[in-house]
Amino acid sequence: MTEDQILLGIALTVALAAFCQILAGKLRVPALLLLLPAGFVAGSLTDVIHPNNLVGPEFSALVSLSVAVILYDAGLGLDLRQLSGRTRGIVGRLLVAGVLVTFLAVTAVAPALFGMSLASAAMVGVILVVSGPTVVGPLLEYVRPTDKLRRILVWEGTLIDPIGGILGALVFHAVSSSASPKGHGYQLGQFAISMGVGLVGGAAGVALLWLTLRVLRLGETLGTIAQLAVVIIVSAGCDVVRDDTGLIAATVTGLAIANLPGFDMPARRPFFETLVQVIIGLLFVSISSTVTPASLKPVLLPSFVLIAFLVLVVRPFVAFVSTGRAGLGPGERGFIGWMAPRGIVAASTASAFSAGLSDQGLAGASKILPVTFLVIVGTVLLYALTAVPVARRLGVVRPSRSRPLLVGGDRWVVDMGKALRSAGLQVLMWAGDEDERERIRGAGLELARGELLAAATTPRARLEGITTVFLCTDDDDFNALASVMVEGNVEGPVYRVGPPHEGRGVIAPYTGGDVLFGAGLVRHVLAERYRQGARYLVQPASRPVPADCETLFVVRADGRLDPVTRTGGAAGAGAAAAAAGDLLVLLGPVP
């Protein structure tokens, strides 16, 4: 290829990856639903984005390193201490049953469907056991199931990614060594050596990250660079010693960093998270461009049969045997049986391993990537189209009523929570000071657990069941900082009470975001007016607002909560935006 063609191919790949991910975010669908078809179409229409033309035969090595970074990031999200109670047992059974049943079922039917060898079928089987949070998460955001279901499915998808990556690498080595004429003992030894190399590499990665993150205490930027460098060095080093053991090392490193005490991991990793998303986009546009229409044609109809088998037989059976006597209702068990899309690790491992098996002359190995491609697209599309009506039919969709979290324990904040509760909302409150927490309990309001906000600042944590956060403490800098840290970990928006106009705190005057109420109702003004006797009133929107009252919230007839904000808009319009059947929460006058 000429230099101009290479530049055009790189630019087109980046443009497709960015556009698909942005559009998927706006549509609230998994990015893979757009990335894979876009790469396939572009690869069919032009050769300029084909990775073998842009990179050459070294593309498989880049895929391996990219998958290592993705699996390391997935491992970082696996804080096993957050998996507790009945959820732990359900998720554990789903993982064990899902891996065993899916692997055995696909391995059994793939030779007849695709005319491949049993070894190739085993590789397809282990590839298709994975799901992943990058496809499950966006679907659940769209469906809005109950908190219990969301927690179970997100944990299953998050844990199955690294497990699938490790199993994929192990089965690959087992399949590769099966062609050896030296007997099963030799093959088992080769398998053990591969596992040992991966574990040693993982231990080396943990030691290096302990040095950089714990001993040297590098900051966020340098710490991110150190993490990326360690993952690539360890993964590449293991692959040099033993092919495709780098995935094991990367996954073990991420799991250890997330769960060993003493690591000073930053609460937010925006650069690393952005880097992973860029890698995902570029990787899957490139991978899908290698899938040609000619390679899909002979496996198209059998793949539809496999998708139906996975969706209608395998997954419901896994859900049935895993959720018995678990305290779940029939609708909840049914929805778990209707949510198992395939995602990132499936495509990555298929691309990483299929070429090596094809080079060894394994029968049917060339069909591994096309079959995986069709199963990913088919399952994601099927669940995206049917998840909402299925959830509604099963009665597992969370009600649309808002559940606000009020952070702060001053008397005026506690009374505000009582006013919102009297308007029919389920209010949750949090405060750090024990006296304030006791005040919340005395008011009969639900008090969140003590570590709620600390947990919400960790990567991939989520304030489950909370639709809106109102930060109303007496520390303006805390409110401003918490609004930045918690944003993205709650389903809806995050608001904070306004700081004094003349304030010059460390953070508050320079932080954007949604500020509650009008320009005059800043924190100290609200507190002073309450101290002087002003109280909250709840009245129907059909009644005129008294001239000496100010509208703070509009509670919609369906239970949605819209606060008045400084920036205006629909919520900021206050009573003018209210309709018949709505309720208004007002701040009354000082007596």
Image (cartoon, rainbow, N blue to C red):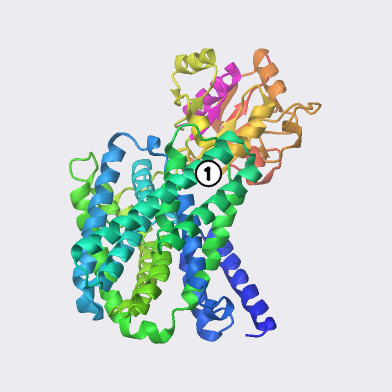
The answer to whether 349 is drawn above or below residue 392 in the figure is below
Give the x, y percent position of residue 141: 45, 51
User: Circle 1: is it few (<14), some (14-19), or many (20+) Cα within 10 Å?
Assistant: some
- Split into 4 quadrants, where in the image is the N terminus? bottom right
What stretch of residues is rendered in magenta?
Answer: 404-424
The answer to whether 232 is drawn above or below residue 11 in the figure is above
Q: Residue at x 32, y 65 (%)?
A: 172
Q: Is residue 490 visible?
A: no
Which residue was labeled with disc 1?
Answer: 208
Is 458 displayed left or right of 506 in the figure?
left
Is 167 displayed left or right of 275 in the figure?
left
Q: Give the structural element (helix, strand or loop) at label 1.
A: helix
**411 magenta-colored:** yes
Q: Is residue 387 visible?
A: yes
Q: Residue at x 42, y 38 (%)?
A: 259
Q: Residue at x 51, y 52 (%)?
A: 231
Is 323 or 572 nearer to us in this picture? 323
The answer to whether 571 is drawn above or below residue 548 in the figure is below
Number of callouts? 1
Give the x, y percent position of residue 163: 34, 53
Kindly indicate the quadrant of the structure image that contains residue 436: top right
Is 489 or 420 nearer to us in this picture? 489
- Split into 4 quadrants, where in the image is the C terminus? top right
**263 magenta-colored:** no
The answer to whether 69 is drawn above or below residue 119 in the figure is above
At label 1, which amino acid type do we have?
Leu
Is 477 displayed left or right of 126 in the figure?
right
Give the x, y percent position of residue 68: 47, 57
Kindly indicate the quadrant of the structure image that contains residue 13: bottom right
Kindly indicate the quadrant of the structure image that contains residue 195: bottom left
